[in-house]
Amino acid sequence: MTMPFQILHMPIVTSQYWNIAYGRDAGEAALDAEGMQTMRSLGKNMARMLHALADQPQPEYEARQAMNFIR
């Protein structure tokens, strides 16, 4: 599922598990302790990555060279 992001050279922020919290009614997702822990971990990782990337110059990429497999 992450391959389209990788192809576009996008950094991927990870967490400890699936990035989701469960709840049916309004406010119930906040009661999902594991989901909220996962979201906190995701937020911390995202902040750390954004902070690290802010000081870096934008990378330069080579022009794409497409391969035609039909000869």
Image: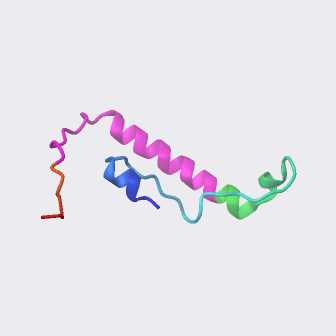
Which colour style is shown?
rainbow
Q: Where in the figure is residue 12, as x and y percent of width and height?
A: 42, 52
Magenta segment: 38-64
Q: Quadrant of residue 35?
A: bottom right
Looking at this view, name the residue that lies furthest to the left: 71
Left/right placement of residue 11 relative to residue 41 reads left
Q: Where in the figure is residue 61, as x and y percent of width and height?
A: 19, 42
Looking at this view, name the residue that lies furthest to the right: 25
Left/right placement of residue 69 relative to residue 55 reads left
Q: Where in the figure is residue 21, as x and y percent of width and height?
A: 71, 57
Looking at this view, name the residue that lies furthest to the front: 71
Residue 50 in the image: above or below residue 67: above
Residue under the image location 33 percent in, 47 percent down: 8
Q: Nearer the viewer, residue 42 or 9?
A: 9
Residue 50 in the image: above or below residue 20: above
Q: Nearer the viewer, residue 38 or 10?
A: 10
Left/right placement of residue 14 relative to residue 20 reads left
Q: Nearer the viewer, residue 69 or 14?
A: 69
Number of labelled discs? 0
Q: Where in the figure is residue 9, as x and y percent of width and height?
A: 31, 47
**Residue 19 magenta-highlighted:** no
Residue 17 in the image: above or below residue 30: below
Residue under the image location 48 percent in, 50 percent down: 45
What secondary structure do most residues of the magenta stretch adopt? helix
Left/right placement of residue 37 relative to residue 41 reads right
Residue under the image location 27 percent in, 36 percent down: 56
The C terminus lies in quadrant = bottom left
